[in-house]
Image (cartoon, rainbow, N blue to C red):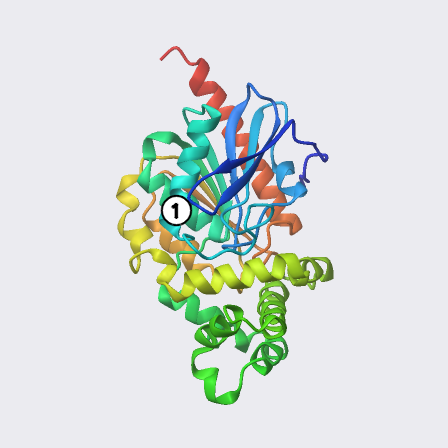
Amino acid sequence: MLVLYPDIKPYLTAYLTVDNPHEIYYEECGNPQGIPVLFVHGGPGGGCNPADRCFFDPEKYRIILFDQRGAGRSRPHAELLHNNTQALIADMEALRETLGVEQWLLFGGSWGSTLSLLYAQAHPERVLGLILRGIFLCRQKDIDWFYQGGAAHVFPDYWQHFLKQIPEAEQGNLLSAYYQRLTSSNELAQMAAAKAWSQWEAQCATLRPNHELVDNFTAPHVAVALARIETHYFMHDSFIEEDQILKQMDKISHLPGIIVHGRYDMVCPLDNAVALYDRWPEAELKIIRDAGHASREPGTVDALVRATMEFAERITKDLTDPA
């Protein structure tokens, strides 16, 4: 079974100024002359971390990571003003132009799969292919599944803690109730809500309990951005039309793709991946039999690293083939 590549340091870190007040953090590592690949993190609001560089062979790939608006090291932290899906797509395109990249491979998981698909549908000529994990189509039923009782049937103990933050009278719309607290001026209430929101997500993300992931998600800096930005997006239907991704798959149906999805993904159930695969003739679907939603479960790591190896071979062959 394949594992992540060894830790690697970026050779460039910088900020890209976009709409006021946002500055987007980005970095590059690996081979400056290699195949450009953009890592698109989840959330929205999750941010990148050093291990995200390690899905790619640093000798073959020019590895580009960025933190979306309000997330990770981007500034200002957890900012909701001018933070929407269309702005994130524009930021990706601005980053591509800034870096002088003609075309790149997109690698995204969870919300990162959502944003990668939406970017590709907006700019198909700029995309070499897509490697996507834990597909999230952002349909209303997908939001309801995780935040209004579906996943609660699998994790009733974790769900009780998620419910306790909200008075019973408001539990009919937990997303709205959390959003009100996460956007309030009461910092104590905001932090309590952020930690509970992020803890629920982390606890459900892996097939086997992962305390390191829970600790990371509930760390104040991560929890506030993740919870505030997620509720902001989900309260606004992720700034897209219902079922938009599937309805517009004809725009990218010619692009190659590899979909990796855990059989026991309780955050974004497998039907998301199957629905996408059914609309995407050039895609392969890899169902990981012993994994949930998280990117670094062993079977998922193996499949994602194999996917990056496969794309490196495919793209290199296409570039060198005289035909």
Task: Give the image quarter of residue 194.
Answer: bottom right
Q: Secondary structure at mark 1?
A: helix
Please, is residue 33 above or below residue 230 in the view?
Answer: above
Is residue 268 visible in this depiction of the protein? no
Other-residue count near label 1 (Cα within 10 Å), few / some / many at <14 / 14–19 / ≥20: some
Residue at screen point 57% across, 26% down: 61
In this figure, which residue is indicated by the disc labeled 1? 87
Q: Position of residue 166 (x, y in %)?
A: 54, 82
Q: Position of residue 202 (x, y in %)?
A: 62, 63
Q: Position of residue 172 (x, y in %)?
A: 43, 83
Task: Answer with left or right where residue 28 lies relative to residue 112.
Answer: right
Q: Residue furthest top?
A: 322
Q: Quadrant of the C terminus?
A: top left
Q: Quadrant of the N terminus?
A: top right
Residue at screen point 32% across, 41% down: 121
Please, is residue 171 above or below residue 238 in the view?
Answer: below
Task: Answer with left or right where residue 141 lies relative to residue 33.
Answer: left
Amino acid type, residue under disc 1 in the picture: Ala
Please, is residue 289 above or below residue 101 in the view?
Answer: below
Q: Position of residue 170 (x, y in %)?
A: 46, 84
- In this view, the residue in front, 67 or 34, is 67
Residue at screen point 33% across, 35% down: 124
